[in-house]
Image (tube, coloured by chain):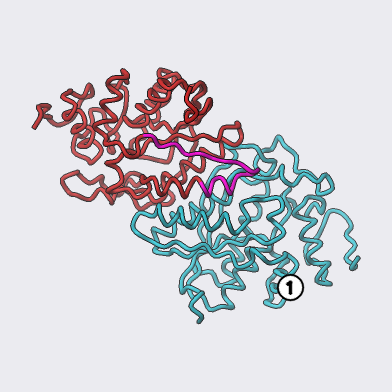
Chain colours: A red, B cyan
Amino acid sequence: MSKEHPEKALLLLSGGMDSTTLLWWMRARDIETIHTVGIDYGQRHRIELEFSAVLSKQGGGTDHRVIELDMTQIGGSPLTSDGLNVPTAAAGRQIDTVVPYRNMLFVTAAAAYGETIGVSDLFISPVKDDYSAYRDCRRAFYDALETALSLGATREAQVRIHTPFVECPKTEVIAEGLRLGVPYGQTHTCYNGTRPACGRCDACIERINAFIENGQRDPIDYAVEVDWRMP
Amino acid sequence: MSKEHPEKALLLLSGGMDSTTLLWWMRARDIETIHTVGIDYGQRHRIELEFSAVLSKQGGGTDHRVIELDMTQIGGSPLTSDGLNVPTAAAGRQIDTVVPYRNMLFVTAAAAYGETIGVSDLFISPVKDDYSAYRDCRRAFYDALETALSLGATREAQVRIHTPFVECPKTEVIAEGLRLGVPYGQTHTCYNGTRPACGRCDACIERINAFIENGQRDPIDYAVEVDWRMP
């Protein structure tokens, strides 16, 4: 095993395509112990929590833990407020879906849990496409967060945040997942939290495009008709 | 008003001596709008939440908000686990009371709330004595956290974490509070969460010593007899 891969690690597994692909990617790199963590943050698409528990088992996760972090208290995003509608991708308002400091709270809570079980290698799956809308998907942010986590650990420690897909377009991530046999039919993406998926929110559109660019048809159902041919 | 003090700010107000002193200190510096935030993290001494709500009003807080962050899920500390006893100061095991990444989660949640109300100046009250046991009470940690918060903000932003007492011994903080008329009888300190206070945990001992070193008697009651004379 190359030095860059730890023996035990903690993975933030949302049950979406990227984090699920990351689980399969980690397994393929012989990371022996993979504790997976899902976050119940009051998301409209909380259905993803059920998917992530199943996927953890299927992907060889050592154990799976759900941590509650109620972001509905903070508000400000349609993902956590019933009163706000999820914008369609066509509206060009993906920034409105931001839940403030969501990733930072997730990683910090994961680090706290990791400290209690002796794990300081944390994996999270931002992809390159994310960071046009989400500043907390850039590597510079994770570098700063890593420093804060190391300085704030209970005892002297080096916490590492691994983001192997951060410079990788989503299409390539999915291509890798298709090679690895990721069961995408069991992942959840739609911000509206529906099955069939709405097919209109930013998350659905990105997912659909990633399949089309790979010359594949997404195994999940959509509430709208999708043209799966290459444009 | 000097440039270093913002017009509006958010204060993490636990209801203990240090954060309460900081509220009075901020008022004395003409910070006009002070949103106070208490965190319900499942602490054994949750009685402090009632004190903080009252103190916010009394100290001129603009409004007070309680955010829930259930740290009992993380475990590892007697402050959040009924099954673990709070060590006495005599045991010399203050590090056992650490709740992993507590301050980091608090500040990040406060920053998230701050973003929704347009406040990017956050105040928190670590004091110099804290950082022998608590690494997340050092300024270097807050510098790193500030960088992560700025890089992770939804839109380009400069988040500032103000820690005016970080190089100040607790005795001096209390001296300042006594000058400012802080109603210490209404603050809560004891880790066991009892009134009268236990008088034996690290938090009580530090509090008692701070009063003795100021030649004062603490207005709150203790379950043990305390000798208030200077040693």
Residue at 43 percent across and 22 percent down: it is: A29
Magenta stretch, residue numbers: A147-164
**Residue placed farthest to the front in the image?**
A2
Split into 4 quadrants, where in the image is the C terminus of chain A?
A: top left
Please check the rendered image and state whether residue B137 is part of the magenta-colored stretch, yes or no: no
| Left or right side of A39 for B81 | right
Across and down, in percent, residue B10 comes to: 50, 64
Residue at 72 percent across and 74 percent down: it is: B178
User: Circle 1 sits in a helix, a strand or a loop, which is it?
Assistant: helix
Amino acid at dot 1: Ala
Across and down, in percent, residue B73 comes to: 57, 36
What is the chain letter for disc 1? B
Instruction: From the image, tell me which residue sits under label 1.
Output: B175
- Classify mark 1: residues with Cα within 10 Å, few (<14), some (14-19) or many (20+): some
Across and down, in percent, residue B13 comes to: 59, 61
Comparing B4 with A121, the one in front is A121
Q: Quadrant of residue B199?
A: bottom right
Please check the rendered image and state whether residue A161 is part of the magenta-colored stretch, yes or no: yes
Comparing A169 with B24, the one in front is A169
Residue at 38 percent across and 34 percent down: it is: A164
Across and down, in percent, residue B149 comes to: 45, 55
Total marks drawn?
1
**Residue placed farthest to the bottom in the image?**
B1
Q: Quadrant of residue A157?
A: top right
As drawn, A180 above or below B183? above
